[in-house]
Amino acid sequence: MSSSLRTWCRRNEYSFVVADYHGVGRSTGDVEQATLSKWVDDTVTLLRTVASPEEHRRVVLVGAGVGGWIACLVAMRHPDLVGGVVGLAADPDFTEELLLKRLPQDVIDRIMEGMEEVTWGDKTYPITKALIEDAREHHLLLDGPERTLPIQCPVRLLHGLMDEEVPFDTCVRLAQRIETEDVTISLSKSGHYMDDIDDMQRTRIAIQDCLESIFVYDLRSPTSG
């Protein structure tokens, strides 16, 4: 998906930045420090190098899975940096909603002793006590302390009806809590990864929609339509 978006952005002369989170994918780092707080802080640090609130230049955040959770958190806490959110099979609160409600108790016990490798779908992930506790204390969206989520930018949530890892009604619950009225949901008969040609096209349309909303409605910009 990221390579397809990179090509599309270059073709349309949009700036594009992609990164793996601390301790994930090609990023280095101690997995014990891989928490929502760390990922959110790192994302904000990255955005401050590419976004410019002083020039009213913001970014559209595209996040898949936990990336959708992180994108919402950043949009809530740093609206000056984020002009739109596109969530692909976003899984806010997956630590509580999916892991702790579905895993066998013996697996949960091992996680809470420090760390356990957990198979979810067709992949295996290191799940730590630090990740669970940090998310619970600071970052829950669906069942957190805030009745509504103070996100004012356009939000586009895409999800597959055949997703066996994250229930598709997650995006509905998330949309119901987001404050902005400019939030849409797009469902397709796809699985969790949403990586076929049609899903990529829907993703590009969602991004373009956010970009056009920024251009039209950000009246602080002298070039706004």
Image (tube, rainbow, N blue to C red):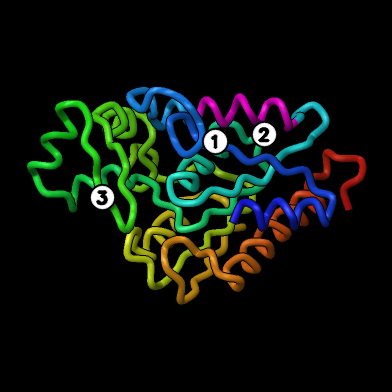
Residue 8, quarter of picture = bottom right
Depth check, mark 1 against mark 3: the one in front is 3
* Marks 1 & 2, CB-CB < 8 Å contact: yes
Badge 3 element: strand
Q: Amino acid at mark 3?
A: Thr
Mark identifier at residue 74: 1
Number of residues whose C-alpha sits closer than 10 Å to that of mark 3, classed few (under 14), some (14–19) or many (20 or more): few
The majority secondary structure of the magenta stretch comes to helix
Q: Is residue 219 above or below residue 7?
A: above
Q: Amino acid at mark 2?
A: Leu
Q: Amino acid at mark 1?
A: Val
Judging by the rendered image, the residue that carries numbered circle 3 is 119
Who is closer to the viewer here, 225 or 121? 121
Q: Residue at x 29, y 42 (%)?
A: 95
Q: Residue at x 26, y 44 (%)?
A: 96
Q: Position of residue 195 (x, y in %)?
A: 53, 64
- How many numbered discs, if any? 3
Is residue 29 rendered to the left or right of residue 106? Answer: right
Number of residues whose C-alpha sits closer than 10 Å to that of mark 2, classed few (under 14), some (14–19) or many (20 or more): many
Q: Gap in Å between the C-alphas at discs 1 and 2?
A: 8 Å
Q: Position of residue 119 (x, y in %)?
A: 26, 50
Judging by the rendered image, the residue that carries numbered circle 2 is 81
Q: Gap in Å between the C-alphas at discs 3 and 2?
A: 35 Å
* Marks 1 & 3, CB-CB < 8 Å contact: no
Q: Gap in Å between the C-alphas at discs 1 and 3?
A: 28 Å
Q: Residue at x 51, y 57 (%)?
A: 88
In the image, the segment drawn in magenta is 40-51
N-terminal-most mark, 1 or 2: 1
- Image quarter in which the N terminus is found: bottom right
Residue 213 seen from this side: no
N-terminal-most mark, 1 or 3: 1
